[in-house]
């Protein structure tokens, strides 16, 4: 998963461009790795790892611990607009 920032596109109102936020992705991944909020798969992420995919840093869990809402929360806590 990655953290994103959105900005209004030069194409006009209602359009936006997305850019990756590597610093927020790294911070969100590290925060998620420390997470321990229950017994569901997304409540912990002992295998959360920052990986490099081409030019983009991403957070990966081979055991599929990452939850979208939870990762989005950590991205926003670290200055990003959204996650994907």
Image (tube, helix red, strand yellow):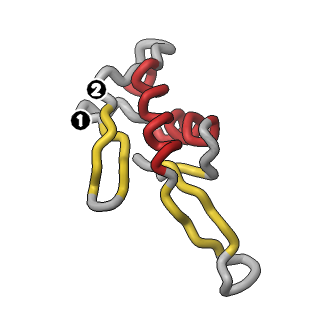
* As drawn, 36 above or below 75: above
Label 1's element? loop
Label 2's element? loop
Asked where in the image residue 33 lies, by quadrant, the reply is top left
Q: How many marks?
A: 2
In the image, 59: left or right of 21? left
In the image, 30: left or right of 70? left
x, y percent for residue 64: 30, 34
Residue under pointer 1 = 62
* As drawn, 17 above or below 38: below
- Tell me what residue is drawn at x 36 percent, y 41 percent: 59
* As drawn, 47 above or below 66: above
- Tell me what residue is drawn at x 51 percent, y 52 percent: 21
Most extreme residue toward the right, as rendered? 13
Cα separation between marks 1 and 2: 7 Å
Say whether disc 1 or disc 2 marks the residue closer to the N-terminus.
2
Residue under pointer 2 = 47
- Tell me what residue is drawn at x 53 percent, y 33 percent: 70
- Tell me what residue is drawn at x 65 percent, y 78 percent: 9
x, y percent for residue 1: 40, 46
Q: Are marks 1 and 2 in contact (CB under 8 Å)?
A: yes
Asked where in the image residue 69 lies, by quadrant, the reply is top right
Report the disc number at residue 2. none
């Amino acid at each position: 998963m990655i953290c994103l920032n959105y900005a209004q596109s030069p194409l006009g109102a209602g359009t936006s461009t997305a850019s990756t936020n590597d610093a927020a992705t790294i911070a969100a991944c590290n925060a998620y790795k420390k997470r321990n909020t229950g017994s569901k798969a997304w409540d912990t992420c002992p295998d959360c790892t920052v990986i490099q995919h081409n030019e983009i840093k991403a957070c990966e869990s081979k055991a599929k611990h990452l939850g979208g809402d939870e990762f989005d929360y950590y991205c926003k806590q670290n200055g990003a607009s959204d996650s994907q």
